[in-house]
Amino acid sequence: MPTITYILKDGSHKAVAAPNGKSLMEVAIANNIRGIDAECGGCCSCATCHVYVDEEWSGRLPDADQMEDELLDGVSAQRRPESRLSCQITVSDALDGLVVRVPTTQG
Ligand code: FES
């Protein structure tokens, strides 16, 4: 099972086992990752699941689609090139070792 590491706003790291097919948001909620509120439940309408993908990984993920891209314009934290909505990233073996950071303004 892939391992995903979330870096929390206090700088601590939490590495969790992530089942294939789940979104990074669902994995975060299941593991009580602070700062991932996911108010819309993953239907890409709230932007409260914003994360920064580690630079090493940003080019290895599928690009955000138009809906995600537009919603990223409305995130409460600063939008950066590595910004993604965690509900739109699906866990697979190819993501084993992925590191994402929760914005300090969330949670
Ligand atoms: Fe609402 Fe991701 S959970 S946009």
Image (cartoon, helix red, strand yellow):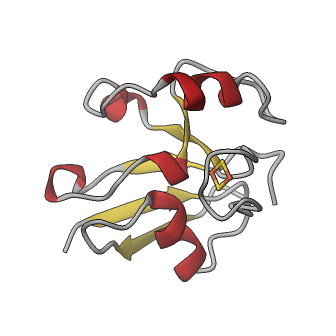
Q: Position of residue 62 (x, y in %)?
A: 31, 31
User: Which quarter of the image is occupied by the C terminus?
Assistant: bottom right
Corner quadrant of residue 9: bottom right
* Left or right position of 7 against 35: left
From this view, report whether residue 75 is shown above or below residue 20.
Answer: above
Determine the residue positioned at 41% across, 28% down.
55
Corner quadrant of residue 40: bottom right
Determine the residue positioned at 37% across, 67% down.
22
Q: Position of residue 63 (x, y in %)?
A: 37, 25
Q: Residue furthest left?
A: 93
* Left or right position of 79 against 54: right
Between 55 and 49, the residue placed more toward the observer is: 49
Between 7 and 18, the residue placed more toward the observer is: 18
Corner quadrant of residue 93: bottom left
* Left or right position of 41 against 95: right
Q: Residue furthest top?
A: 81
* Left or right position of 90 against 34: left
Determine the residue positioned at 61% across, 53% down.
43
How many numbered discs?
A: 0
Q: Position of residue 91 (x, y in %)?
A: 30, 59
User: Which quarter of the image is occupied by the N terminus?
Assistant: bottom left
From this view, report whether residue 49 is shown above or below residue 64.
Answer: below
